[in-house]
Amino acid sequence: QCRKVQVIFARTPVLAAARSDLNSRTYLLPGGVDTDLFDPERVTEVPASMLALPRPRVGFVGTVDDRIDVGLLVHCARALPAVSFVLLGPIKRHRVNVDALRREPNVHLLPACPHQSIPAAVAALDIGLIPYRVNTYTQALSPIKLYEYLAMGRPVVTTDLPYVRREAERIRIARNGDEFL
């Protein structure tokens, strides 16, 4: 398919390199964020589902699937019982088992919200998390949530993915569970 299309845009250097062998018109187009939508000055209210959760609130906004390091989050939830861990988004049950997370009293799995409401959800967090497992698949990811968190002025803690290293001066990159804590 890559040979048949006129142009390919890839969000990470890894993907661009992999596709450029198949199509010479492959271009790197890194992720970004709608700064009008993700403007902290425009957020006027906290989602009701998050308002009742005790602070500090640390969380992930996005699809909960096999990219998420469930064991890492369970480790953190147990080590930091006074912290509310929030995962807001659809759960792909066929791709991830969240039972261990559900057993932790300070972990809150909230349903997805409309895209227009994501800035308010991010604003309700004290820290934005990118708790992805590090594997072949995630090595090529460019998580848009990184820019959403940063645009909303939230500190970011992430696992060590190649793409996020470009923002190393602005975020905390953890190579293991203790560093993630």
Image (cartoon, rainbow, N blue to C red):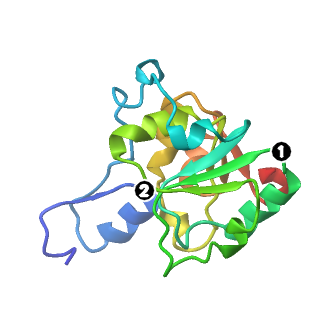
Rate crowding at label 1 as few (under 14), some (14 to 19) or many (20 or more) other CA atoms within 10 Å: some
Q: Which residue is mark 1?
A: 82
Q: Compared to 97, does 79 lie above or below?
A: above
Quadrant of the image occupied by residue 178? bottom right
Residue lying at the far top of the rendered structure: 41
Q: Nearer the viewer, residue 26 or 68?
A: 68
Where is residue 143 drawn, in percent x and y?
Answer: 48, 52
Q: Nearer the viewer, residue 129 or 20?
A: 129
Where is residue 4 drawn, in percent x and y?
Answer: 13, 75
Q: In front of the other: label 2 or label 1?
A: 1
- The structure residue drawn at horizontal position 62% and vertical position 47%, both measured from the top left corner, is 59
Q: Which residue is mark 2?
A: 12
- The structure residue drawn at horizontal position 47% and vertical position 23%, both measured from the top left corner, is 40
Residues at marks 2 and 1 touching, judged by CB atoms closer than 8 Å: no
Q: Earlier in the sequence, mark 2 or mark 1?
A: 2
Q: Is residue 149 visible?
A: no
- The structure residue drawn at horizontal position 72% and vertical position 46%, both measured from the top left corner, is 84
Q: Which mark is residue 112?
A: none
As shown in the figure, which amino acid type bears the numbered disc 1? Ala
Horizontally, residue 1 falls left or right of residue 60, namely: left
